[in-house]
Image (cartoon, rainbow, N blue to C red):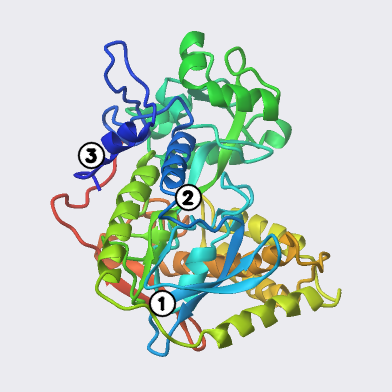
Amino acid sequence: MCSQAPKEVMDLEHMGVTFHRNDKGEMDLRAFGGASMKRTAYVADITGQALLHVLYEQLMKHHETVERYEEWFTTSLLQDEDGRCCGVVARDVRTGRMEVLQAKNVILACGGAGQAYKPTTNGLIVTGDGIAMAYRAGAPLMDMEMVQYHPTCLVDTGILITEGARGEGAHLLNSEGERFMEKSAPNKMELASRDVVSRAEQIEINEGRGVGPGGSGIFLDVTVVPRKRTLEALREIVNIGKDFAGVDITREKIMIRPGQHYIMGGVKTDVDGATSVEGLYAAGEVACVSVHGGNRLGANSLLDTLIFGRRAGEHAAARAAHMSSPSFDAGTQLRRDESELEAIIARSRDGRRVSEIKNELGETMNKHAAVFRDEAGLQGALETIGRLKEETAKAWIDDRGTVFNQDVLGALELGYMVDCAEATVLAAIERKESRGAQYRTDFPERNDEEWLKHIDISRGKDGPEISYSPVTITQWQPEERKY
């Protein structure tokens, strides 16, 4: 990832990404948490959005050779008699029509499972679809216990306030006006890694030094950054502060707290994005190549997506060039998916609403599988998830139509989220140590002798099955992390 990063960044610039420039006209770099130098190319505080728009423009540019299926929802992966992945079953959201899309390869690029938590910085569609579909198809999941909380999210909504604010010099303050990061990371302060900062904030909140209603927040003070620089490099969060918190961050402090942001785990792949299911690839947050270990550094998620998205595409294209198109009857899978959706729509109102179950799932995960964890809380979460899985099978919906029926898709997404949450909690229980984003208050120390290994979760006949795989160590040996 690191060796291929410079070329990828330059390719993006040549496509039209307007990376920020310094006074000399050179590409500017910004400090992000956990790093020892400024190393992050950026576009103000909308880097991800800028990349998204430019890449979509490239897709539109090649419209004659690339067919787009917009407003479609994948319900399952197609597999032939030998277990090879050879397409998907999908629903046209506009009409409700189901269709089989056969393919030589399938690349999952569905993002993570943030909506299994509440609050989360993730969008409403980030519901673990790809992770759960791959899991159900037989691909193992890896490192699912490693869930990153971002230190700076709006208290009420979970909306992200970019790490770039701290990169520009913003301070974190408790109710006593203290820069409490001096206690946790005196050398890095606010630019320690995200797990360290999130835990430091949560300690302040738990010990009664939080701010706002119920002391549930921490102050982020951006006023220490020159106003001109804030308006130039942080203009999006200036707008977010005004629109969602009623705060002008150039003149007053804004209240934040830790919120679920990213999962380091996902579908286990190799460096070409290939999974153990032949013909199935994954890239981005849905995948676990394990370049992030147990604790991703800021900005590396976009880089991961770009590098391994390209590698997965190139590998899948090379494989497709030397094989014929799949030829098998996919009608059985199509009819099964159609029947499942019809059954959801026809359910009686004996159970709970999808939204009620999703809300309880999110609050449970945020309470017991967040920045601090312990055996009792995780076991309680696992019991709750087991009950919610049963309730999901009977959850009812209001919309019984076919045109843009988001209700029925929400019911499917809930099933995906429950699968992801179960895998996360099982892995967190299994790893009896603290490492990266996993902090067990009952096992506060890192234990390389017993736990320097990946936890893999596969779907067995009787439920999830846990196994292990070795950690690949090359140039850098594990060391104690100090700040």
Report the amino acid beneath label 1.
Answer: Cys
> Mark 1: few, some, or many residues within 10 Å (few <14, many ≥20)?
many
Q: In front: 422, or 216?
A: 422
Which sits earlier in the primary sequence, circle 3 or circle 2? 3
Whole-number angstrom distance, CA of label 1 to CA of label 3: 32 Å
Q: Are marks 3 and 2 in contact (CB under 8 Å)?
A: no
Query: Does 203 sit left or right of 467 as displayed?
Result: right
Which sits earlier in the primary sequence, circle 2 or circle 1? 1
Report the amino acid beneath label 3.
Answer: Lys
Determine the image quadrant of residue 61.
top left
Q: In front: 200, or 287?
A: 287
Image coordinates for residue 134, horizontal then vertical, percent: 46, 71
Q: Mark 1 points at which residue?
A: 85
Give the label, 2 or 1, closer to the camera: 1
Q: Can residue 142 be seen in this view?
A: no
Image coordinates for residue 433, horizontal then vertical, percent: 38, 60
Q: Mark 2 points at which residue?
A: 262
Report the amino acid beneath label 2.
Answer: Tyr
Give the label, 3 or 2, closer to the camera: 3
Q: Mark 3 points at which residue?
A: 7
Which sits earlier in the primary sequence, circle 1 or circle 3? 3
Q: Which residue is drawn at 62% across and 79% down?
A: 337
**Kind of element beneath mark 3:** helix
Whole-number angstrom distance, CA of label 2 to CA of label 1: 27 Å
Q: Which residue is drawn at 37% across and 73% down?
A: 104
Determine the image quadrant of residue 193.
top left
Question: Which quadrant of the figure contains the C terminus?
Answer: top left
